[in-house]
Image (cartoon, rainbow, N blue to C red):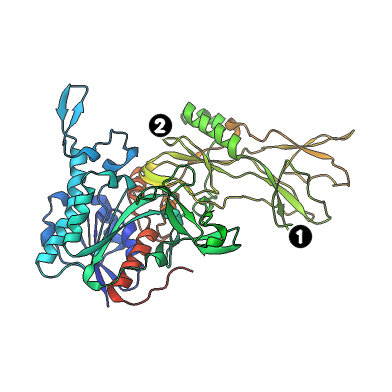
Amino acid sequence: MTYSVLDDFAGFGGSSQGITAVPGTELSMAANHLPLAVEVHSANFPDAEHYCGDIAKADIKSWPRVDLFWASPSCPPWSDARGKKRDFDKSTQGVLFDPEVGAVSTDPETIRARALMEEIPRYLKAMRLKGKPVLGGVVENVVQVTKWDQIGRWRKEIESYGYRTRWIALNAMHVTGPVLGKVAQSRNRAFLAYWLEEFGRDPEWDKWLRPKAYCPDCDEVVSALQVFKKPKAFMGVYGIRTGQYVYRCPRSSCRHRIVEPSVVGADTIIDWSLDPGPKIGERADHGKDPLEPATIARIEAGLARHARPMLAPAGGTWREHATPLEVPMPTRTTRETDGLVVPPLLVPVAKRAGVNMASTIEEPMRTQTTRREVAMVMPPFISLLRGGGSKQTAYPVSGPIPTVSAQGNHHGLVGPPADPSMLLAYYSNGGLSPVSEPVGTLTTRDRYAVVGGDTPPVDQCTFRMLSAKEVGRGMGFRPDYRVKDGISKRDEVRGYGNAVPPAMSEVIVSALVETFSGEHLEPAA
């Protein structure tokens, strides 16, 4: 059986990609208020009907009935990152005080966000009254939406039309779609899933939402359990130190120890062939503005915190693991060579609060907003030559990128200086030589030292913003997804940042479609 789908507030089509990856689904209609978003969406889903206009003013009751209703109402008014005082937890007041004019004024953006949330029960009610109820659906938003003082009433209204519901707190980096795979971004989102009570069965959420994680005590990969730090909590963000929930091993033998689900790195979305940009200290020579002092400070702090070199085996060798420089150098052989590597960094360049920490690309990308606010810094590396003259270069870039958001590209790239370090031979006739040249004969005694500290000079690093295509890959969009020719980078990044990572909608809709049909779907391995 084929299940028809309506994607409301569809944007560029992140949610639509995930939904249509689920067997048995067919996108019937998509709606959005931005003409550019509708144009991009219709180019990729030409068989679906498209509505372009203000959904809050649309006669949604007259829209065609579908089996599955996905809705992603505008999230910035609910988010802490919007740079405005949050007042939706006091919506009964209905007004805000404007200190500049000394008067009470209405915040139209917040009012519109509330109105858009009300469209969901409005549509469900209309289809129920027509005698053809929607089988189920999903409402997606930021986690702060659950602080809305009307959220309980809103949820009960949906349930009053014959649905069971469940709140889902989910981070994109912990999702693995059977078709779309993993997402290289840390993006916390809230989902309210609902399905007809008359089915008499609930979705197998554990099957679709429990990420795989390695438990060192049990010495095996387990399906991790989501556990909130406060027993009565049901929504929040992931984080061992600062989040509201963690993942634990389901086995009692290890006392349900905290485990960290496997993630993919930013290296999966970075295009290393792109021009790395000018050195930070030479930006003026290339007609570019100097970086903000706050950005420089973040880079320096990130380099000091993360740019710790290590010796990594390269070429044919019996060794498997990299070693820090604080420990003795591994045994020299006649064949092996080592590369001195340090992980690249992603550095936020935004001025707003809460985005002041650099991270390595061994970690997930931060949430992408609609702005371009993040750069990538890559500390220097040393590549030694193996006998025969083939260079071996190591890049430990195995972690996800920071979250991509709809406010723009918040990610930039900083690369290594052209001649980052020198080798010093400390014997009577020794001298300095670039690390790009072959190292001298390795004897049974220590003869070479790396000149330079652990932290490279910021002005010698190169810097560039992430490209729009890299941002799209960080969101999990398909590589062949079509975007309008001639679109500005700003608009393209905004479209990606407003989207739902496709793999997130894929796993949630998979659970719902199983409930509709009663037939098994295969999750990712």
Q: Nearer the viewer, residue 285 or 153?
A: 153
- Horizontal relation, residue 509 to residue 186: left or right: left
Label located before the other in sequence (1 or 2): 1
> Which residue is pictured at 31% across the width and 61% down the height?
16
Relative to 494, say whether 165 is above or below: below
State the CA–CA distance, disc 1 to disc 2: 48 Å
Q: Is residue 494 visible in this depiction of the protein?
A: yes
- Horizontal relation, residue 108 to residue 329: left or right: left
> Which residue is pictured at 28% across the width and 42% down the height?
78
Mark 1: secondary structure: loop
* Kind of residue indicated by mark 2: Lys
Q: Which corner quadrant of the image does residue 38 belong to?
A: bottom left
Q: Position of residue 293 (x, y in %)?
A: 49, 26
Q: Nearer the viewer, residue 175 or 60?
A: 175
**Residue corresponding to mark 2:** 351
Q: Position of residue 480 (x, y in %)?
A: 40, 61
- Horizontal relation, residue 381 to residue 222: left or right: right
Return the mark for residue 494. Answer: none
**Residue corresponding to mark 1:** 318
Mark 2: secondary structure: loop
